[in-house]
Each structure stands twice: as C-alpha cells, then as structure tokens.
Amino acid sequence: MEMMQPNMEDSRSAEAVLSVVIPAYEEGSHIKSSIGVIESVLKENKIPYEFIIVDDGSRDNTWAELKSLTDTNPKVTALRLSRNFGKESALCAGLTYAAGDMVLVMDADLQHPPELIPEMVKAWRNGADVVDCIKNSRGKEKPFYRICAKLFYYILLKTADIDLENASDFKLMDRMVVEAWKQLPERTTFFRGMASWVGFERKQLRFDVAKRVNGKTKWSSYRLLRLAVNAITSFTSVPLHCITILGILMLIGTIVLGIETIYMKFSGRALNGFTTVILLQLFIGSSVMISLGMIGIYLTKIYQEVKGRPRYLIAKCIKGGEKK
Ligand code: UDP
Ligand code: MG
C-alpha cells in the first residue's frame, strides 16, 4: 500500500477545494433547497467547493431532483446506489468520489448547521486535519434511548478507548485523512468510529442540532441497535473476554458451593438447597446461551468480512455540467 505524503502547509490556501459529501435517503422534498442553503454559505465565504450527493436507493423523487440539479449546477455530482445500503455505505461511496483537498460530511436535512462550515474550514487552514463537530445536547429523546446511548458510549470508551459521546457525523477531514480512512479494509463500516481511530491533528467545534427541515428520521430502534452492535464488535473484543471472566467467576462459585454441598452431605442435611439448584440451573443456562450468542455475533462479523462483498454498488453517476 502506498503511503500518503504528509500534507504541505502551503496547500491549505484559500483556493483549496472543499468536497461536501451528503448521503440522502428519501429526502426528495427538500434536498434541492438544503443544497441551496449550503451553497449560498460557501459562495458567501468564497470557499471553492464541489458537492457529492449520494442517493442511497431512495424510492421517492430524490434521484429525479438530483438529476435536474446536475443539469443546472456543474458543481454537483450525483451518485445513485443500486438499493438502500444504509448511511454508512452511502458515506463510503461519497468519500471515494470526493476529490477536494478537504472533505466535509453532513446530513441532507440541515440538522448540521451550514453556518458552521466557514469556521470548520478556518480550523483546517490553521492546521487541523480533522474538525469534529460535537453536539451540545442530544435533543429530545425518550429516557430509555438516552440510557441505552449512554451505556453504548461508555462501553466504547472503556473497552476501545474511543470517546464518541455527543460525536456526530458532521466532520471535515483533510485529504490525507480521507486517504488513510480509505485504506481501512473492513466491509461493515462505522464512520464515526473509524474517523476517530485514524487519529491526526484534531479540533472540536460545538453545535446545536437543528430541527429536521422536512421528512422524518430513518433510524428505527432496530437500525440503531444494529449500528450499536456493529460499532462495538468492530472496535473491541472485550465482550468475548467477559465470557472468560464470567467462567472464572462461576468456577469460584462452584468451588464454594461444592465445599458446602459436601459438608452438608457428610453432616446428614443434604436435602436442603432446592432453590440453589434451580437458581444455578437458570444462571448457568442463560450465561451459556448469552456467551454463545456473543461468539455468534463475532462469528457473523468474521463471516461477512471474509465474504468480502463490496460496501455498495453504484447504479448511476452523473457529474454536473457534463453532456449526457
Ligand atoms: N441516510 C442514508 N441512508 C439511510 C438512512 C439515512 O443515506 O438508510 C441519510 C439521510 O438522508 C440523512 C442522514 O443519513 O442525510 C441522517 O439521517 P436522518 O436524518 O434520518 O437521521 P437522524 O438525523 O435522525 O439521526
Ligand atoms: Mg437528521
């Protein structure tokens, strides 16, 4: 594999091009206006730019909107995936096509405030390789979700040393970082985690999550759970070691209870202890099943990686301004 040359400071000029990568799934009602808002911020601040919009297999009019946008706007490249692959895969596609000196990733629903872009670009010009935007608050959500999210971030922090609490996918990355990111070979990706794993000079900015302009969120509880499991299994094998630790704890319990049982037997009081037997049965049964399940999750992951299927398939690609 080729090593990237470290970025020369003087390439961070005012002429440096910013690639804005936006994954869009069923955002047809507002994708054009969202891009318009972002574009006006870029123009106002005289930041050279290109847009890479990835239609993640939407069934609504998103693709038609993007197509008509490429007719009039030469700065827009529209990609269409062959089906809905999920945001992570859409991001991969976008990052692969982005050609700018820096790449900005943001959502299509304006929940990531475009007003922050000039500040991010400024941070990049001042030497930051990655500009992470951190959410000031998580917005409104059910207490159960909040607890699950906290637990998820806690596990990742403690086991993989990756702090993603309040992190978002709203990020600006230097070309060198994108190239490093592209070298990570895994099939099932977790952008936020991988972008943190690569390291480099980082700067954090804070922002308030805006309201979705239109449409609704595509993250069901099931999708969120799948993302969380994927993130944890991608970055840590600690759950597997937990099984071993559980086994050792149970062995200690076995020794204690074994001694007690033998003592009872010889002192003629052996019939007692029905409850203990039932509880032990249940405990051992459930921990064996959970352990097998955990091994199963990692096994599935290995299986999927070994198959080596592509992260996404591109059905169409239109570069704005090109004659078709
Ligand atoms: N998205 C995508 N593929 C999907 C789901 C979502 O490309 O399968 C995009 C979506 O169009 C948006 C971004 O990912 O630009 C964030 O999605 P959403 O706003 O639904 O998530 P939330 O902001 O509620 O976390
Ligand atoms: Mg959103």
Image (cartoon, grey):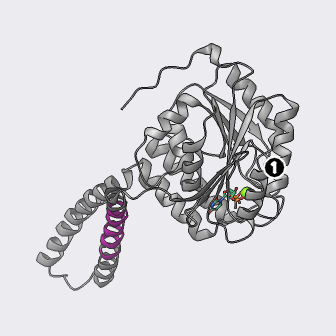
Give x and y (percent) for residue 288: 30, 71
Q: Is residue 263 left or right of residue 189?
A: left
As drawn, which residue projects farthest toward the left?
266
In this view, 311 is above or below 192 = below
In this view, 263 is above or below 162 = below
Which residue carries the number 1 mark? 72
Magenta residue check for 261: no
Magenta residue check for 297: yes
The part of the chain drawn in magenta is 285-300
Question: What residue is shown at x 55% (from left), y 63% (from top)?
Answer: 85
The majority secondary structure of the magenta stretch comes to helix
Identify which residue, 118 or 81, lies in the foreground.
81
- Quadrant assignment, res 174: top right
Q: Is residue 19 left or right of residue 289?
A: right
Identify which residue, 39 or 165, lies in the foreground.
39
Give x and y (percent) for residue 63: 70, 62
Question: What residue is shown at x 19% (from left), y 82% (from top)?
Answer: 270
Q: Is mark 1 within 8 Å of ligand 1?
A: no
Q: Quadrant of ligand 1?
A: bottom right
Please name the amino acid that badge 1 sits on.
Answer: Thr
Q: Secondary structure at mark 1?
A: helix
Identify which residue, 148 or 191, lies in the foreground.
191
- Quadrant assignment, res 8: top right
Give x and y (percent) for residue 120: 73, 31
Question: What residue is shown at x 73% (from left), y 52% (from top)?
Answer: 138
In this view, 43 is above or below 127 = below
Identify which residue, 213 or 209, lies in the foreground.
213
Disc 1 crowd, CA 10 A, few/some/many (<14, 14-19, 20+): few
As drawn, which residue projects farthest toward the front?
323
| Residue 202 visible (yes or no) | yes
Question: What residue is shown at x 64% (from left), y 13% (from top)?
Answer: 10
